[in-house]
Image: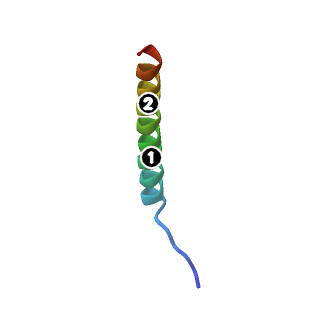
């Protein structure tokens, strides 16, 4: 059973995942800073 995958699709998926992680990380930092300041 051969698994064939589209490299372009894979690249898009990874980029999307990276953006989501970055966004979540930025939100976490923002919340952390807000809580620390208050």
Residue under pointer 2: 26
Q: How many marks?
A: 2
Comparing 17 with 35, the one in front is 35
In the image, residue 28 lies at what x, y percent? 45, 32
Figure quadrant of the C terminus: top left
Sequence-wise, which precedes: disc 1 or disc 2?
1
Figure quadrant of the N terminus: bottom right
Q: Residues within 10 Å of mark 1 (few under 14, many from 20)?
A: few
Residue 29 is labelled as none
- Quick check: 14 above or below 33? below
In the image, residue 14 lies at what x, y percent? 48, 51
Residue at position x 42%, y 59% from top? 9
Q: CA distance from mark 1 to mark 2?
A: 16 Å
Residue at position x 45%, y 48% from top? 17
Q: Nearer the viewer, mark 1 or mark 2?
A: 2
- Quick check: 13 above or below 32? below
In the image, residue 7 lies at what x, y percent? 49, 59
Name the residue furthest bottom.
1
Comparing 16 with 28, the one in front is 28
- Quick check: 8 above or below 2? above
- Quick check: 12 above or below 21? below
Residue at position x 55%, y 76% from top? 3
In the image, residue 5 lies at what x, y percent? 49, 68
Residue 15 is labelled as 1
Tag 1's secondary structure?
A: helix
């Amino acid at each position: 059973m051969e698994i064939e995958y589209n490299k372009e699709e894979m690249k898009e998926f990874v980029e999307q995942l990276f953006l989501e992680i970055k966004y979540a990380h930025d939100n976490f930092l923002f919340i952390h800073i807000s809580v620390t300041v208050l």
